[in-house]
Image (tube, coloured by chain):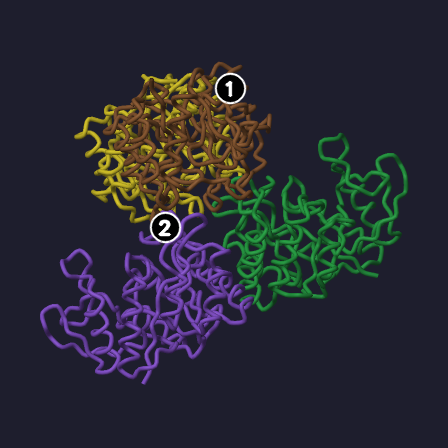
Chain colours: A brown, B yellow, C green, D purple
Amino acid sequence: MQIDLNCDLGEGFGRWSLGDDAALVDVVSSANVACGFHAGDPGTMRQVAEWCVDAGVAIGAQVGYRDLAGFGRRFIDVEPSHLADEVLYQIGALDAFARRAGARVTYVKPHGALYNAIVHHQRQAEAVVEGVRAFDATMPVLGLPGSLWLELAEKAGLRPVAEAFADRAYTREGTLVPRSEPGAVLHDAEQIAERCVRLATSHEVVSVDGTVVPMTPDSICVHGDTAGAAVIARAVRDALEAAGLRVAAFSGAG
Amino acid sequence: MQIDLNCDLGEGFGRWSLGDDAALVDVVSSANVACGFHAGDPGTMRQVAEWCVDAGVAIGAQVGYRDLAGFGRRFIDVEPSHLADEVLYQIGALDAFARRAGARVTYVKPHGALYNAIVHHQRQAEAVVEGVRAFDATMPVLGLPGSLWLELAEKAGLRPVAEAFADRAYTREGTLVPRSEPGAVLHDAEQIAERCVRLATSHEVVSVDGTVVPMTPDSICVHGDTAGAAVIARAVRDALEAAGLRVAAFSGAG
Amino acid sequence: MQIDLNCDLGEGFGRWSLGDDAALVDVVSSANVACGFHAGDPGTMRQVAEWCVDAGVAIGAQVGYRDLAGFGRRFIDVEPSHLADEVLYQIGALDAFARRAGARVTYVKPHGALYNAIVHHQRQAEAVVEGVRAFDATMPVLGLPGSLWLELAEKAGLRPVAEAFADRAYTREGTLVPRSEPGAVLHDAEQIAERCVRLATSHEVVSVDGTVVPMTPDSICVHGDTAGAAVIARAVRDALEAAGLRVAAFSGAG
Amino acid sequence: MQIDLNCDLGEGFGRWSLGDDAALVDVVSSANVACGFHAGDPGTMRQVAEWCVDAGVAIGAQVGYRDLAGFGRRFIDVEPSHLADEVLYQIGALDAFARRAGARVTYVKPHGALYNAIVHHQRQAEAVVEGVRAFDATMPVLGLPGSLWLELAEKAGLRPVAEAFADRAYTREGTLVPRSEPGAVLHDAEQIAERCVRLATSHEVVSVDGTVVPMTPDSICVHGDTAGAAVIARAVRDALEAAGLRVAAFSGAG
């Protein structure tokens, strides 16, 4: 049995760093690397791509809105044809660094407000699909299970990859508890690690109201930008391996 | 006999356009397409790449400093390793649009202050060479004849391509008359066209003081961002063809 | 009798220009000067402020979303407290150039997608009101008649100034015909000028279906960024003056 | 006796923070607040301005090159007239937040590569002087003792304020030991604090070769962006106060 662990990496910008990339690259199997539109810069992209290749980690394009000031966390009503072009631009730029390091971009994961928008925003979801397909018509793409994004991606020939979140609480319907509600984000490393093992081995998660909800993620997302993130991510990986799972990229790359 | 005509294209940004790309793409054989750091945006890059493929024009990466506010026309003392990464980023991004249109980026031409800096600035010249080589170790690169840039590029295995300027006056030493001096820029379409024919057929140019200077460019640069630019470029092409020359990309692409 | 003519000015950015600022500043009485977030740069702001003072034109802050790539024409779901701060930043920056030229910023007009959003988006409308009030608690603000923006501005102590559009068709309810519908934008200079005179003297406009609609604008907006814009604006002013009206800033400045 | 302590504050950008502003504002008497061109954003500027007013700290404009990607640390060969306008823009923007908090911008301190350039670059030094004077013709300005910048500022009617660096080694000529040399930066809080007391009370500093060099700074700069910066700054202040000095803004503001 195997499971993928994905995490956002390379989210600094110039003088400003964010998250412990060097530590996280040794923990995850898939790295969502920021491409310069909402975070990331060429020097960071080169460095992270090299680290990924050294560690056998798959390189994914973390594409987002053009919004450095907002870290890609604000919805922007971009004209869909521009959005498709912006997605392609970002993948192309990152791929140059992946190639330089001896690899390729092997998947795409939209970031922040774009990730959330295309759960339901049809024109933007279609635009992201178009942008990805212009790069590779069968590219794997990460997203929320049940999202319009993954549905449209699959119809268009891309490979949908559903993810669960290691540190987020779920409702009994299997949707995320909104961040605005208490208990939405888990902080205890041991508890998070146990949930991940259960997700990966029993394909279920316990919701906020105690219901056991079936869930079969292709990848589990661990966070990298909060205090103690690398510690939690390491705990998750150790627990998965202790349970006999192989942590490996869903894309087969790395 | 054949000669290449190169021109800057895709130098608008969002709402702002610059130059008559649609007209110029029918005149030149090589298009230096801005990649988003000093000019250019993803939508424009997609459009221009499509036009280039339709017109059989080679797509080159017009790489520059990260400086939209200054249009890449101010020297920036970028740390060389960052500059190399920025060059690679730009080429990779443009190549995604070239591929989407069914082509590739087939050469690189630095822009503005970067073009001028690497005539003599060793560390930045080396950085641009490194950035280009990370994309393609034998890529053709355009530049000023006699520049350190072309010398270092050749030593590193890139293919140096020397260009002459259609509308610039030359000294008897074969260097450009500085823009600050009177007569540095020519404006008469007929005169410019005649000079280009002489350059392409007799491999010589008449300097500001009347000396005949030998010059064997691989490409002639016509400008696209001034009033009447497309008219002059068309006059140059018509004159070259009337003189029996074939206008074709030096890179063999297009 | 007097009427104000307002127009967007200073909407270039660096190498890219837009509209004929030098001509328009001699036509209008109020200039909405871009402040650098969606268009405009410090050099342009200084130049336009000087021209305004020379021509006796009032200087207004054309504030917008932080979005150079989109020219401020895409809705951005900015957190309201950030939006308030961004508005204040822009006004403060422009005011430095107004002061340098011997004047002040005497009003604020939101731009593009922000203008449209705050017609109904309560939290963003409140944020813009807060940003303006932080600069001047009794500042005049331009906007769409009947908009939530002008209503909230008035309640908060700002001075609401309702504007009509010289070149836009109106419905019988007095709202703008959407740009997506045929006939939404008028192009005939003479017709536009006549409508403006009727607006300023009889306080009425003829709607797309021929109904006479009462309308009492404090200012008429002429556009500056389209071909022939300066010609139309000049025709409007000439017609207004020929009808005995004095074209003067609503703010009393200039 | 009194001495000023100045420190860079507000150098984050959006999601990215830098330095412990909340701690440092309680230690220094003058805050060099980034204005958005190389660091800083409107929300941060508002927050820091409020903290400064609450803590009785003078607000200075930390102006820099337009270069977020480079944090203003790369020389840019900006055309001087543009540089002057960019300086004025930044001061004006920050002043809006200072006014909102009940204060004003009371001095200007250039940042990073601009700080270094105008030690000797005449045209840029003149430009910064012009930009500051356009805001306030008698504004105090911080800089390196003996720099062309302070000399030209004084000639133009600005008030030059010479600063010493708490954590930098000096040569026997009283110039800074270049960062590239060993021992250029001091790290021991106690040693740094002792040097500052000697500077403020005896007006001398011990150079790298043991020479006692006379130096009479109007302000001492402590750094805020390194690990332990706030701890060092606090040690400096405590030592100064223990030595009977009053730490107070040179500008009299705060």
Instruction: Locate residue C128 relative to residue D37 in the image: left or right.
Output: right
Q: What residue type is labelled 1?
A: Ala
Q: Are marks 2 and 1 on the same chain?
A: no
Q: What residue type is labelled 2?
A: Ser
Instruction: Locate residue C55 relative to residue D71 in the image: left or right.
Output: right
Residue B84 percent coordinates (x, y): 28, 37
In depth, the one of A212 and B101 nearer the eye is: A212
Which numbered mark, 2 or 1, is in the foreground of this view? 1
Q: Which chain hosts label 1?
A: A
Query: The N terminus of chain B lies in which quarter of the figure?
Result: top left
The part of the image, by quadrant, that contains residue C161 is bottom right
Residue drawn where x is 46% and y is 34% of the image: A111
The part of the image, by quadrant, that contains residue D184 is bottom left
In depth, the one of B158 and B14 nearer the eye is: B14
Residue drawn where x is 29% and y is 61% of the image: D229
Spatial distance from mark 2 to mark 1, Cα to Cα?
56 Å
Query: The C terminus of chain B lies in which quarter of the figure?
Result: top left
Name the residue carrying label 2: B180
Residue drawn where x is 50% and y is 16% of the image: A154
Instruction: Locate residue D223 relative to residue C119 in the image: left or right.
Output: left
Q: Is residue C49 above or below residue A244?
A: below
Mark 1 surroundings within 10 Å by alpha-carbon count, few (fewer than 14), some (14 through 19), many (20 or more): many
Residue C35 percent coordinates (x, y): 55, 54
Q: Which chain hosts label 2?
A: B
Tag 2 secondary structure: loop
Name the residue carrying label 1: A153
Tag 1 secondary structure: helix
Q: Can residue D106 be seen in this view?
A: yes
